[in-house]
Image (spheres, rainbow, N blue to C red):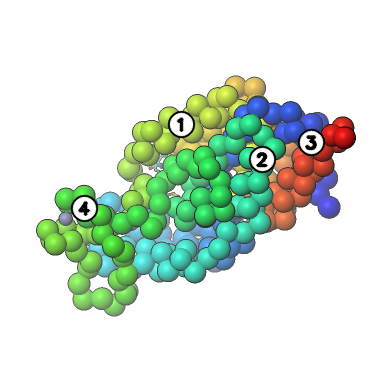
Amino acid sequence: MTGFASNLIERLASAGNVAVLTGAGASAESGIPTFRDPGGLWSRFNPAELASFEAFRRDPIRVQSWYSARIRAVLESEPNPCHVALAELEALVPSVSVITQNVDGLHKRAGSSNVIELHGNLLDVFCATCGRAAETLDVAPDALEPARCECGGLIRPRVVWFGETLPADAYESAVSATARADVFISIGTSGEVYPAAGLPRLAAEAGAYVLEINVQRTPISGLADEVVLGAAGIVVPQLLSEVRRRSNVGVS
Ligand code: BV8
Ligand code: ZN
């Protein structure tokens, strides 16, 4: 059983606003590889070679086939107990905002009702030239031709590549949810990609109690009030049941 500081449980049970920032570690137990862990997506590929518009223009088949493989993995995956516990937290806290860097859509599938997708969604594909929505993206690495729209434009996923700005409305919502949070929970992110990685500091400076849940310490650990080392799919459900128990105490 994970040991949480008692005032954490007290704070969560009495919180009005909770903001949660998730990264690839929150989806790891759904079988979706993380980016920077050993064996992760980027141990085999260089992000600049894949997650940028320049790379897409230079070698569309390579980028489209990388995303095609990730789309297949997402379609075969299920929300894990971390996603489910965050959705269930909404029954115990008046306002829960899930700010995610993940592009797999698993928080929404788990039932979270206020999900802010900072980096977009892999399953939403469209024409980079005319903007028309496409059905899907399914290109093999040895394809002779990239996937194109009727207008001739290349099909891309609606994700934020390096050098591209985040959707303004999503980032503004994330900043306001962070600024009003009583408790801010960072789950499964390496804290390396900005501007998302700046949110934990913003939360701390706005007076939130900052909890980090990760299997290892990160650049966020130094500014967290509490760091719990453990797998998201185990720790987050435990946190939820402690808050549920605390909320039921005194209820006759
Ligand atoms: C931008 C695409 C304006 C989608 C991704 C300062 C301010 C603004 C920008 C910058 C800045 N400094 C530098 C920049 C540029 C750049 C950047 O941040 N570079 C970094 C590398 C230094 N940022 C940008 O370009 C952003 N755009 O700001 O626009 C602008 C424009 C031009 C110039 C300046 C500013 C765009 C950023 C988005 C990039 N797109 N992906 C896709 O293909 O998925 S980033 C990619 O990394 C993913 O989106 C991913 O979500 C994100 C973060 O990674 P993590 O989720 O943290 O995953 P990671 O593998 O790293 O870590 C996993 C963690 O989980 C680990 O800590 C591990 O220990 C833990 N873990 C593993 N298993 C478990 C676990 N924890 C718990 N349980 C487990 N079971
Ligand atoms: Zn088009």
The amino acid type of the residue labelled 2 equals: Ala
Badge 1 density bin: few <14, some 14–19, many ≥20, Cα 10 Å: some
The tag on residue 247 is 3
Q: Which residue is mark 4?
A: 132
Give percent across and percent down for residue 170. 42, 36
The tag on residue 173 is 1
The tag earlier along the polypeptide, 3 or 4, is 4
Instruction: Measure how far apart labels 2 and 3 are at the Cα level.
Output: 11 Å
Horizontal placement of 140 versus 7: left or right? left
The tag earlier along the polypeptide, 2 or 1, is 2
The amino acid type of the residue labelled 4 equals: Arg
Instruction: Measure how far apart labels 3 and 4 are at the Cα level.
Output: 48 Å
The residue under the point 21% across, 53% down is: 132
Instruction: Measure how far apart labels 1 and 3 are at the Cα level.
Output: 28 Å
Q: For the residues carrying marks 3 and 4, which lies nearer the camera in this image?
A: 3
Is residue 17 placed above or below 68 in the rendered structure?
above
Instruction: Measure how far apart labels 2 and 4 are at the Cα level.
Output: 38 Å
Horizontal placement of 218 versus 234: left or right? left
Give percent across and percent down for residue 67. 37, 63
Q: Which residue is mark 2?
A: 91
Count numbered badges in the picture.
4
